[in-house]
Amino acid sequence: MQHAFVFTEVAVLVRHWFEIDLADSHLEHGARVELRLPAPRPRRGSESAAQEIVIDRPVWRADLFDRLDGTPGAFEAAHFHPHFVGVEPSDRHWADEVTAAPFDWLASCLTDVAGVVAAAGVQLRDPAAVNEQVGAEAAAIVDAARSRAPMLCGTAGQCYAWTRDAEDAVHVMLGSLQRPDLLDRERVSPWLPAGVRG
């Protein structure tokens, strides 16, 4: 499940995410918050017609993750991607404030979304209005992120239930591991085909 907060010039998507590190197969999970730009769409139908909404251009992402082999709630894998190249995120960026107080840090980012977007290399038409709109909903966005925090996902089954729409991405990770021998197969078993579980 994803939460979508759609504003005039930006949208904020919030979800739980499950990640397998490709280098050493350690597992991460937690809240993913992604800032995207809605694509302008032509008006259709009557004055009452439902309109198409396309939210397809990512510009920034925060991954407020725990390592499953780490201390629950320590956010040892919490990081952010300050920009995207097309649909691909930039390298991970680490900051003490992200791991120390991830939801406070997220709230501070949401108070200046226009600045976050500008740092990603994108210019908004009305930055002040964007900051006002997103700022008014910042608490609700942070609450949505808290509801998908790693501490609320204690089992493999819960992670799978919250991320089953991203099963294809997990399969890509599973097929790209440099050290598959280190993989916790029990934890990833919900994503594995029935014949290779266990």
Image (cartoon, grey):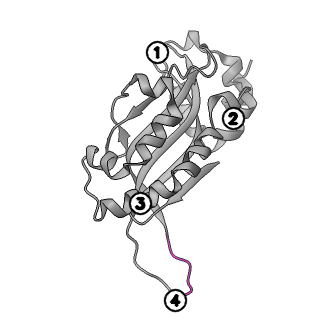
C-alpha separation, residue under disc 1 versus residue under disc 3: 45 Å
| Residue 54: x %, y % from top left | 46, 63
Amino acid carrying label 2: it is Tyr
Residue farthest to the top? 181
Task: Pick whichever, 7 or 167, lies toward us.
Answer: 7
Q: Relative to residue 195, is residue 9 drawn left or right?
A: left
Contact, CB < 8 Å: mark 4 with mark 2? Answer: no
Task: Pick whichever, 196 or 144, lies toward us.
Answer: 144
Q: Relative to residue 118, is residue 49 drawn left or right?
A: right
Q: In the rendered structure, find residue 47 and report the number of the disc placed on it.
A: 4
Task: Pick whichever, 143 or 93, lies toward us.
Answer: 143
Dot 3 or dot 4, earlier in sequence: 4
For the stretch drawn in magenta, the main secondary structure is loop
Label 1, on which residue? 178
Label 3, on which residue? 132
Taking 84 as reference, is 67 above or below it? above
Q: Nearer the viewer, mark 2 or mark 3?
A: 3
| Residue 12: x %, y % from top left | 48, 52
Label 2, on which residue? 160
For label 3, the SS is helix
C-alpha separation, residue under disc 1 versus residue under disc 4: 55 Å
Contact, CB < 8 Å: mark 3 with mark 4? Answer: no
Q: Relative to residue 88, is residue 145 drawn left or right?
A: right
Amino acid carrying label 1: it is Gln
Q: Quadrant of residue 152?
A: top right
Amino acid carrying label 3: it is Glu
Q: Residue 72 lies in magenta, yes or no?
A: no
